[in-house]
Image (cartoon, rainbow, N blue to C red):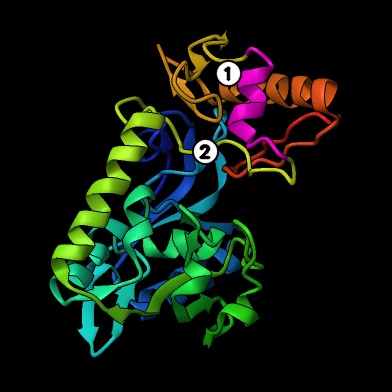
Amino acid sequence: MKIEEGVELARFTTLGTGGRARAFARLESEAEAAELLQWAEEHSLGAAVVGLGSNLLAADDGVDRLVLKLGGELATVEVDGDLLRVGGGAANAVALHRARAAGLGGFEFACAIPGTIGGGVWMNGGAYGSDFAGVLERALVVTADGSGWLTPAELGLSYRHSELRHGQVVVRAELRLRPRLPDEIKAEVRELNTRRKDAQPTNRRTFGSVFKNPEHELSAGRMLEACGLKGHRIGGAQISPKHANFIENADGATTADAIALMAEARRRAHEQFGVRLVHEVEFLGELELPQL
């Protein structure tokens, strides 16, 4: 295993922002994950996984952690009856393709989540009324102290949330799916992708949804649109003119620009609707939003 220093995280985030990681390593097995986490602990470093870089904001001044990227056998997908055995580093799109080829439905919603299986478990990713909690049988989680399989209940999965914390790495997962005709799966995925492209800035650099939908008649996007925030810009970042719950890298954006936009959006939503929006995007490094 090679541990690199000073790797630019902007290369690994979909927004294209972020400073250098104190340490960076690629891993391809459960054993390597355990070894790297032990190394991080010995060097008093936290650890975090970058995945495909979506749903992630990395601090401009760097991240004082060991940042991990999963590959090799931890990015494989295998079919076993109605069970999809997947590595934590496998792309959702690859897992969905294998499921469709095997005539297994239930994972179609993941076509709207441009990330990895591990990231989906980490945040209980979901779209169009479905989420990982609905298909996840169990996940193998590695820490510096060992590894173990955890059920959705043990993971504490709820709306866009799990109890997992940095230093815990999802290396494998098992998804329980159901038989469905491949043509039906293909048709639903086509419909969902069309809806997504019509509503979201899929051809722009974003990190995905900014805020969780609140318990309110308006979604986060509709609420921010009502606040007049579509197209609002700070530095090189702007709130998408297409969907107000997305931030685009319009021109050389920094993470600080995105954080400033998020802070302004929360302020206006609270001022106009009395709602405290909670960010869905994961922060990596010394990042926080001002208190309302």
Residue 173: x and y in percent read 40, 77
How many labels sit on residues?
A: 2
Residue 279: x and y in percent read 66, 40
Residue 261 shows in the view? no
Name the quadrant containing residue 54: top left
Residue 168 shows in the view? yes
Which residue is label 2 attached to?
A: 209
Disc on the earlier residue, 1 or 2: 2
Image check: 181 left or right of 263? Answer: left
Foreground label between 1 and 2: 2
Amino acid at the residue labelled 2: Ser
Residue 91: x and y in percent read 29, 58
Q: Residue at x 62, y 67 (%)?
A: 164
Residue range corresponding to the magenta coloring: 217-228
Which residue is label 1 attached to?
A: 257
Residue count near mark 2 (Cα–Cα under 10 Å), binned few <14, some 14–19, many ≥20: many
Amino acid at the residue labelled 1: Asp
Identify the disc placed on residue 168.
Answer: none
267 is higher (above) or lower (below) than 91: above
Name the quadrant containing residue 144: bottom right
Q: Which quadrant is home to the C terminus?
A: top right
Disc 2 secondary structure class: loop
